Image (tube, rainbow, N blue to C red):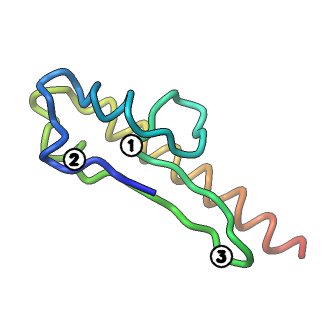
Amino acid sequence: MVIAGNHENDGKNFSNFQERFWMPHNGFNDNHFYSFDLGPVHWVGLSSEFYGYDREYGKESIWTQYNWLNADLKVRRRRSNDA
């Protein structure tokens, strides 16, 4: 499992990284953040690169990841409470 770092910035919003690595689907056609369950553990991968490149690419990715994480953890909490 991978997450983009500063060396993956190609000046095109990490497009080379996007095309080379396929991570679990997150509903946004974006592999910079994702989650999956393996046994009893819920794994979450987040990109800190959105914060370093916010002037270059905008803040939309920051908010998308933030809102996705909140929704993902709410679903996980519901599943944990139901068990």
For badge 1, the amino acid type reads: His
The reply to whether the C-beta atoms of the residues labelled 3 and 1 are less than 8 Å apart is no
Mark 2 surroundings: few (<14), some (14-19) or many (≥20) residues within 10 A: some
- The kind of residue tagged 3 is Val
Q: What residue would you read off at disc 1?
A: 32
Image mark for residue 2: none
User: Horizontal and vertical percent for residue 46?
Assistant: 39, 55
Task: Answer with the quarter of the image where residue 55 lies.
Answer: top left
Residues under numbered marks 1 and 2 in contact, where contact means CB atoms less than 8 Å apart:
yes
Task: Determine the CA span between mark 3 and mark 1.
Answer: 20 Å
**Residue drawn at 57 percent across, 55 percent down:** 35
Q: Residue at x 30, y 35 (%)?
A: 17
| Residue at mark 2 | 49
User: Which circle marks residue 41 in the picture?
Assistant: 3
* Callout 1 secondary element: loop
> Which residue sits at x=51%, y=44%?
23
Pick the front one: 50 or 9? 9
